[in-house]
Image (spheres, coloured by chain):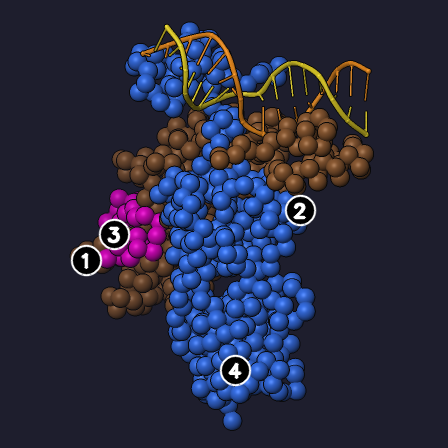
Chain colours: A blue, B brown, C yellow, D orange
DNA sequence: CTGAAAGCGCTTACAG
DNA sequence: CTGAAAGCGCTTACAG
């Protein structure tokens, strides 16, 4: 009863032609006479034939699909509206170039395992803060890839933003408002050994902070300056606030490394009846739509999320098409400080 | 210079074993002696070998990937936060079951073209309001699929919500508030011939509206009742409002078939200095996060979006695993009316 | 514990 | 305009 798949061979026999003709009928029908094509297509329909994508991929060495390699589980990733925008950017390029998009989260906890299995022509790698062999695995795989918001490698095309510029602007803004007790809430990357061991965008943001502090004679070790790491979620932000607010010396400003964290901080502050920016100023990073709707609206750094996705996909498509120049693409996009209502003068 | 791909054969030769052993080393290493595995893996690393997903798929007849068949371009689809939630639900199941997720929008404008090309073990079909041969193409493809928010087919598993129940509750709420001049803003499906020719969820929502109207002696043709269709976007909602507000008899209530449309209506009303709900009540459908943040907050129907995605993926995974009972799965989930601040008594 | 051999279903020069 | 043949790179009974 387990009937064999209908293959090209079956269609060819039914239509009294060769497999070549069947293949041509589906892929290059103008190379065949109209009658032949019609004949073949009819036979195919009657038999319920459908081309096999795997076989075609094996033969053509093409999948017409881009892979988005993600550092976290799919549902966690999508919790952050950041990724929706990023996906839209990638989606635009995919659409235009005729690629589908494979979302490839870690398999059994490991990105290393998903890299060799995904049937794609190339990868966009997002948020690889700390390369633990992934880049090597990607190289071994032998297909092009583009790093976005990741630790950089000279010979791999990359798209990123000027992280340090952004945080520097934010901290300068706060320092100018008189704040000297400042908490920096970074994104957890799992890197051990404190911020001096960080690597990717989070390190670069930290460097921006350090440079702003330095211009006021401060360092992350100065009294009043706190650095902590939380997961990049709303809950992470809330927990950060709660940790900070039991300290003997509460900060007068909290710099979150992402909007979603900042929004969580706002939640927790409201919960604790702490006035923002009256008692504490809060800043974010990204400029998600939510940042302007929150109350108070969030002072933050705008970054071109969608453009990042679009560009990364464009580079990847170029590299797939065989352009050698792609490896020279290292795009660093600029950011803008948006001052809204969550920041104000230091109290007292 | 264009060096041939490194294949299993090369690794086998280098390690002085058979291709079988190489395959085993990567997939079933416990069936080989430790020494052999080590030897093979070393040879593979030295040569820069990587398994070929296409070849493996062809052989095993498995891709370990689910396809999400989308009715619109990727970037358009992702504009609606609805899909982010839906993707999260699917993502949970994918993660648990070890599948990646292929986003498969129409290729060169046609879903029919993407169906035969996607390398997936099954499809989730979302929002296929009007089947124009897609279901047949899916059948021809010979792999499982489940329909979500789509026109129903008895022998295909489906997951949907009780659309008519939701809109009925909404209209009853408005009628009870005294509204008799009501505009119904439906989602454009491209079906010709007026609402009697609609098919999927939009038809079911219309039926809910009709049934609520009937209990007050009204029909969609009654004076004061307007029906129009717009694209499911914020801009679509705004255009609906602007069309309605130039009519001689403005409606006192607008029922949008989705939150994103309702939010667009709110935008346009604010723009036109029309008070909601003072001059006109507005309702949505979905209960996106945005619906509670908007001002005024939106009266709407909550539906379990994430659960829908999760369930659909679960059914699909079951069907892929070969369960015959799957085709009996027709899940219809319930909705809840949420009365917030965008609705009030009919003016005058 | 390891190997020889068949075959998954397609496309593509090449020849006519 | 059409066909015979090779081959893409892998896995899996089967045999030893």
Which residue is the extreme one toward the bottom?
A: A348
Q: Residues within 10 Å of mark 2 (few under 14, many from 20)?
A: some
Q: Chain of mark 3?
A: B
Closer to the eye: label 3 or 4: 4
Residue identified by numbered label 4: A213
Q: CA distance from mark 3 to mark 4?
A: 64 Å
- Residue under mark 2: which chain is it in? A
Image check: B130 left or right of A275? left
As for residue A234 lying within the magenta part, the answer is: no
Q: Nearer the viewer, mark 2 or mark 4?
A: 4
| Disc 1 chain ID | B
Q: Quadrant of residue D16?
A: top right
Q: Are marks 3 and 2 on the same chain?
A: no
Label number found at residue B223: none
- Alpha-carbon distance for marks 4 and 1? 57 Å
Q: Earlier in the sequence, mark 1 or mark 3?
A: 3
Name the N-terminal-most of marks 2 and 4: 2
1 and 3 marks in contact (CB < 8 Å): no
The numbered disc on residue A108 is: 2
Residue B224 is tagged as: 3
Horizontal side, residue B61 vs residue B86: left or right:
right
- Residue under disc 1 on the same chain as residue under disc 2: no
Viewer-nearest of labels 4 and 1? 4
Question: Residue A216, position in %: x, y?
Answer: 50, 87
Give the chain letter at badge 4.
A
Q: Nearer the viewer, mark 1 or mark 3?
A: 1
For marks 1 and 2, give the CA distance.
Answer: 58 Å
Report helix, strand or loop for mark 3.
loop
């Amino acid at each position: 009863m387990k009937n064999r798949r209908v293959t090209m061979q079956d269609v060819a026999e039914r239509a009294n032609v060769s497999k070549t003709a069947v293949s041509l009928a589906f892929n290059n029908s103008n190379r065949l006479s109209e009658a032949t094509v019609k004949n073949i297509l009819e036979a195919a329909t009657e038999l319920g034939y459908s081309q096999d994508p795997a076989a075609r991929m094996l033969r053509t060495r093409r999948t017409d699909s881009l892979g988005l390699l993600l550092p976290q589980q799919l549902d966690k990733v999508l919790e952050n509206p950041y990724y929706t925008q990023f996906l839209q950017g990638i989606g635009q390029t995919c659409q235009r170039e005729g690629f589908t998009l494979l979302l490839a989260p870690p398999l059994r906890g490991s990105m290393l395992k998903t890299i060799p299995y995904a049937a794609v022509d190339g990868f966009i790698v997002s948020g690889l803060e700390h390369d633990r062999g992934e880049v090597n695995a990607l190289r071994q795989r032998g297909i092009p890839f583009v790093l976005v918001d990741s630790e950089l490698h000279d010979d791999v095309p990359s798209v990123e933003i000027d992280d340090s510029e952004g945080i520097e602007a934010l901290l300068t803004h706060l320092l100018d408002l008189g704040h000297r007790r400042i908490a920096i809430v970074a994104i957890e990357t799992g890197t051990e050994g404190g911020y001096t061991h960080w690597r990717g965008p989070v390190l670069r943001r930290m460097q921006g902070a350090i440079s702003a502090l330095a211009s006021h004679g401060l360092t992350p070790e100065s009294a009043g300056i706190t650095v902590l790491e939380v997961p990049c979620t709303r809950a992470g932000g809330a927990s950060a606030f709660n940790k900070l607010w039991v300290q003997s010396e509460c900060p007068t400003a909290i710099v979150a490394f992402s909007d979603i964290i900042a929004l969580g901080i706002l939640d927790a502050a409201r919960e604790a009846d702490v006035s923002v920016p009256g008692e504490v100023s809060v800043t974010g990073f990204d400029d998600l739509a939510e940042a302007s709707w929150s109350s108070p609206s969030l002072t933050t750094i705008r970054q071109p999320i969608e453009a990042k996705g679009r560009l990364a996909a464009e580079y990847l498509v170029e590299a797939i098409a065989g352009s050698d120049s792609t490896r020279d693409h290292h795009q660093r996009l600029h950011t803008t400080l948006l001052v809204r209502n969550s920041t104000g003068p230091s109290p007292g």
